[in-house]
Amino acid sequence: MGHWKRIVAILLVAAVVLVLESWTVHATPTLFKNCTYTRTSDAGTVRPPYSLAPLLGSVKVTLKTDRGTLELRLDRRDAPCAVHSFTHLALQRYYNGTPCPRRTRAILECGAGRPGYQFAPELSGKEDYRRGVVALSNEGGGNGSTFFLVHGVHGAPAGSTIIGVVSNNLTLLDRIAAEPRAKVLEVLVG
């Protein structure tokens, strides 16, 4: 009798695997986007993230600088590959201790170097680079790791993938952007 129980158990497990496999194949287009992260020739230190990026929900990010802490809300809906890459780099501590070397009347750009991979911008043509927007810098035809925060509306670079917004204290963003040599201390996800 034990032999038949084992056969029935194996058949049940096989049936469950087939059902789950069918469900994931059909669910993938609605729950995930297949992203293409291409390694670059520069000596990056981080492996690219896995290719499946979630399409649903938002990600809370805490951006600690030497001038104060900003809360960001990243939206996966319009830029799932970019949000997936940003959170991947944050979890690898890639942004910790990096400078914000570029500031203009409109943006504060942070992050240093290239991670060793890039991916295509996710643009709809309807991007609105309003005050408080967080976007990835377009680094020669693709996204890498550098990001910027919009603190003014005139002069924000078009063609950059918007990944979210500053969800607290735009006054602090203005103060950080006004002072030279700001530095990212830590980026926390969750």
Image (cartoon, rainbow, N blue to C red):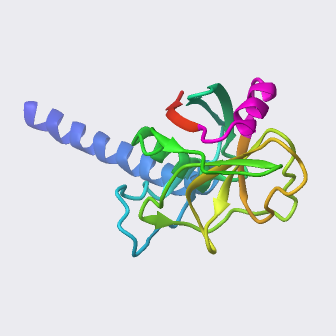
Image coords of residue 84 (percent x, y): 54, 49
Please say if 109 is above or below 4: below
Image coords of residue 187 (percent x, y): 52, 34
Q: At 79% from the left edge and 33% from the top edge, which residue is drawn? A: 174
Image coords of residue 4 (percent x, y): 14, 37
Please say if 47 is above or below 186: below
Q: Find the magenta span and give its range.
A: 165-182
Q: At 15% from the left edge and 37% from the top edge, which residue is drawn? A: 6
Q: Is residue 12 magenta?
A: no
Q: At 47% from the left edge and 61% from the top edge, which residue is drawn? A: 114
**Residue 1 seen in this snapshot:** no
**Residue 75 seen in this snapshot:** yes
Which image quadrant is residue 97 in? Answer: top left
Q: At 83% from the left edge and 49% from the top edge, which residue is drawn? A: 105
In the rendered image, the residue lying farthest to the front is: 180
The quarter in which the C terminus is drawn is top right
Q: Nearer the viewer, residue 135 or 28?
A: 135
The quarter in which the N terminus is drawn is top left
Q: Is residue 179 magenta?
A: yes
Q: Nearer the viewer, residue 184 or 49?
A: 184
In the rendered image, the residue lying farthest to the left is: 2
Image coords of residue 159 (percent x, y): 77, 66
- How many tags in the picture? 0
Please say if 12 is above or below 41: above
Left-right relation of 68 to 158:
left
